[in-house]
Image (cartoon, rainbow, N blue to C red):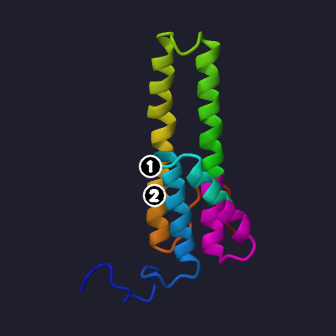
Amino acid sequence: MSPLDNDSPDSDAGGSTPGQSLAVTAEVLYLANLLLLPGLAFFILLAAWHKRRNSAPALARCHLRQTLAASLWAGALLVIANAAIILLGGYHQPSTWVIAILYFTMFHSTFVLLGVLGLAKAMAGREFVYPLIGRRCDD
Protein backbone atom coordinates (compact mmCIF):
# COMPACT_ATOMS: atom_id res chain seq x y z
CA MET A 1 0.00 0.00 0.00
CA SER A 2 1.35 3.38 -0.98
CA PRO A 3 1.27 6.33 1.45
CA LEU A 4 -0.40 8.29 -1.35
CA ASP A 5 -3.48 6.06 -1.27
CA ASN A 6 -6.58 7.70 0.14
CA ASP A 7 -7.78 4.76 2.22
CA SER A 8 -7.48 6.30 5.67
CA PRO A 9 -10.62 8.09 6.86
CA ASP A 10 -8.75 11.16 8.10
CA SER A 11 -6.78 11.72 4.91
CA ASP A 12 -7.59 14.72 2.73
CA ALA A 13 -5.30 13.72 -0.15
CA GLY A 14 -6.44 12.43 -3.48
CA GLY A 15 -8.30 15.43 -4.86
CA SER A 16 -11.46 14.80 -2.86
CA THR A 17 -11.38 18.12 -1.02
CA PRO A 18 -13.63 20.78 -2.59
CA GLY A 19 -11.56 23.55 -4.14
CA GLN A 20 -8.31 21.60 -4.09
CA SER A 21 -7.53 22.03 -7.80
CA LEU A 22 -8.08 25.79 -7.59
CA ALA A 23 -5.90 25.93 -4.46
CA VAL A 24 -3.11 24.09 -6.29
CA THR A 25 -3.51 26.40 -9.29
CA ALA A 26 -3.22 29.47 -7.02
CA GLU A 27 0.00 28.16 -5.49
CA VAL A 28 1.45 27.27 -8.90
CA LEU A 29 0.62 30.76 -10.20
CA TYR A 30 2.26 32.27 -7.13
CA LEU A 31 5.45 30.30 -7.73
CA ALA A 32 5.35 31.09 -11.46
CA ASN A 33 5.10 34.77 -10.56
CA LEU A 34 8.23 34.50 -8.42
CA LEU A 35 10.28 32.24 -10.66
CA LEU A 36 9.10 31.95 -14.23
CA LEU A 37 6.61 34.54 -15.47
CA PRO A 38 6.70 37.57 -13.17
CA GLY A 39 3.84 39.93 -13.79
CA LEU A 40 1.89 37.69 -16.17
CA ALA A 41 1.34 34.99 -13.56
CA PHE A 42 0.44 37.68 -11.01
CA PHE A 43 -2.27 39.11 -13.27
CA ILE A 44 -3.68 35.63 -13.90
CA LEU A 45 -3.69 35.03 -10.12
CA LEU A 46 -5.35 38.40 -9.58
CA ALA A 47 -8.02 37.56 -12.18
CA ALA A 48 -8.64 34.16 -10.57
CA TRP A 49 -8.97 35.78 -7.15
CA HIS A 50 -11.32 38.46 -8.48
CA LYS A 51 -13.50 35.93 -10.28
CA ARG A 52 -13.64 33.27 -7.55
CA ARG A 53 -13.09 35.09 -4.24
CA ASN A 54 -16.74 34.76 -3.18
CA SER A 55 -17.83 31.60 -4.98
CA ALA A 56 -14.86 29.27 -4.40
CA PRO A 57 -14.85 26.61 -1.68
CA ALA A 58 -13.14 27.55 1.59
CA LEU A 59 -9.86 25.77 0.76
CA ALA A 60 -9.51 27.55 -2.57
CA ARG A 61 -10.49 30.92 -1.08
CA CYS A 62 -7.83 30.50 1.60
CA HIS A 63 -5.07 29.68 -0.90
CA LEU A 64 -6.16 32.43 -3.30
CA ARG A 65 -6.09 35.01 -0.51
CA GLN A 66 -2.75 33.80 0.86
CA THR A 67 -0.99 33.72 -2.51
CA LEU A 68 -2.32 37.12 -3.53
CA ALA A 69 -1.20 38.69 -0.24
CA ALA A 70 2.22 37.04 -0.47
CA SER A 71 2.60 38.23 -4.08
CA LEU A 72 1.79 41.80 -3.04
CA TRP A 73 4.31 41.61 -0.18
CA ALA A 74 6.97 40.20 -2.51
CA GLY A 75 6.33 43.01 -4.98
CA ALA A 76 6.47 45.65 -2.26
CA LEU A 77 9.78 44.30 -0.95
CA LEU A 78 11.19 44.29 -4.48
CA VAL A 79 10.22 47.96 -4.85
CA ILE A 80 11.83 48.72 -1.48
CA ALA A 81 15.05 46.95 -2.51
CA ASN A 82 15.17 48.94 -5.76
CA ALA A 83 14.49 52.18 -3.88
CA ALA A 84 17.37 51.37 -1.52
CA ILE A 85 19.67 50.77 -4.48
CA ILE A 86 18.72 54.10 -6.04
CA LEU A 87 19.03 55.98 -2.74
CA LEU A 88 22.48 54.51 -2.12
CA GLY A 89 23.90 55.74 -5.40
CA GLY A 90 22.27 53.88 -8.24
CA TYR A 91 22.95 50.67 -10.09
CA HIS A 92 26.63 51.38 -10.78
CA GLN A 93 27.69 51.35 -7.12
CA PRO A 94 29.17 48.34 -5.30
CA SER A 95 26.33 48.58 -2.76
CA THR A 96 23.96 47.43 -5.51
CA TRP A 97 25.29 43.89 -5.29
CA VAL A 98 25.10 43.87 -1.51
CA ILE A 99 21.45 44.91 -1.53
CA ALA A 100 20.55 42.56 -4.39
CA ILE A 101 22.22 39.56 -2.75
CA LEU A 102 20.66 40.35 0.61
CA TYR A 103 17.22 40.74 -0.98
CA PHE A 104 17.41 37.47 -2.90
CA THR A 105 18.94 35.57 0.00
CA MET A 106 16.62 36.83 2.71
CA PHE A 107 13.31 37.62 1.05
CA HIS A 108 12.95 36.10 -2.41
CA SER A 109 14.15 32.65 -1.38
CA THR A 110 11.89 32.77 1.70
CA PHE A 111 8.87 33.57 -0.47
CA VAL A 112 9.77 30.71 -2.82
CA LEU A 113 10.20 28.27 0.06
CA LEU A 114 6.85 29.30 1.56
CA GLY A 115 5.26 28.92 -1.88
CA VAL A 116 6.55 25.37 -2.17
CA LEU A 117 5.20 24.63 1.31
CA GLY A 118 1.86 26.18 0.34
CA LEU A 119 1.78 24.06 -2.82
CA ALA A 120 2.42 20.91 -0.77
CA LYS A 121 -0.41 21.85 1.59
CA ALA A 122 -2.74 22.58 -1.32
CA MET A 123 -1.90 19.25 -2.93
CA ALA A 124 -2.72 17.59 0.40
CA GLY A 125 -6.04 19.43 0.55
CA ARG A 126 -5.08 21.49 3.58
CA GLU A 127 -5.14 25.20 4.31
CA PHE A 128 -1.89 27.13 4.61
CA VAL A 129 -1.35 30.51 6.23
CA TYR A 130 1.84 32.35 5.26
CA PRO A 131 3.73 33.24 8.46
CA LEU A 132 3.82 36.92 9.45
CA ILE A 133 1.99 38.15 6.33
CA GLY A 134 -1.00 35.82 6.08
CA ARG A 135 -4.38 36.05 7.76
CA ARG A 136 -6.19 33.08 9.25
CA CYS A 137 -8.68 31.37 6.95
CA ASP A 138 -11.66 31.10 9.32
CA ASP A 139 -14.21 32.70 7.02
- Across and down, in percent, residue 51 comes to 72, 69
In-image side of 126 versus 43 (left or right): left
Q: Which mark is residue 117?
A: 2
> Which span is picked out in magenta?
47-68
x 49%, y 53%: residue? 32
- Say which residue label 1 marks: 113
- Across and down, in percent, residue 38 comes to 54, 46
Q: Is residue 66 magenta?
A: yes
Q: Residue 43 occupies which quadrant of the picture?
A: bottom right
Image height of 46 relative to 98, above or below: below
- Across and down, in percent, residue 16 comes to 49, 85
Indicate the amino acid at tag 2: Leu
Q: Residue 109 occupies which quadrant of the picture?
A: top left
Q: Residue 8 occupies which quadrant of the picture?
A: bottom left
Calculate the distance from the C-alpha at mark 2 to the C-alpha at mark 1.
Answer: 6 Å
Indicate the amino acid at tag 1: Leu
**Count of numbered circles on the image:** 2
- Callout 1: SS: helix
Foreground pick, 36 / 5: 36
Disc 2 and disc 1 in contact, CB within 8 angstroms = yes
Magenta span: predominant SS is: helix
- Across and down, in percent, residue 129 comes to 59, 58
x 62%, y 40%: residue? 75
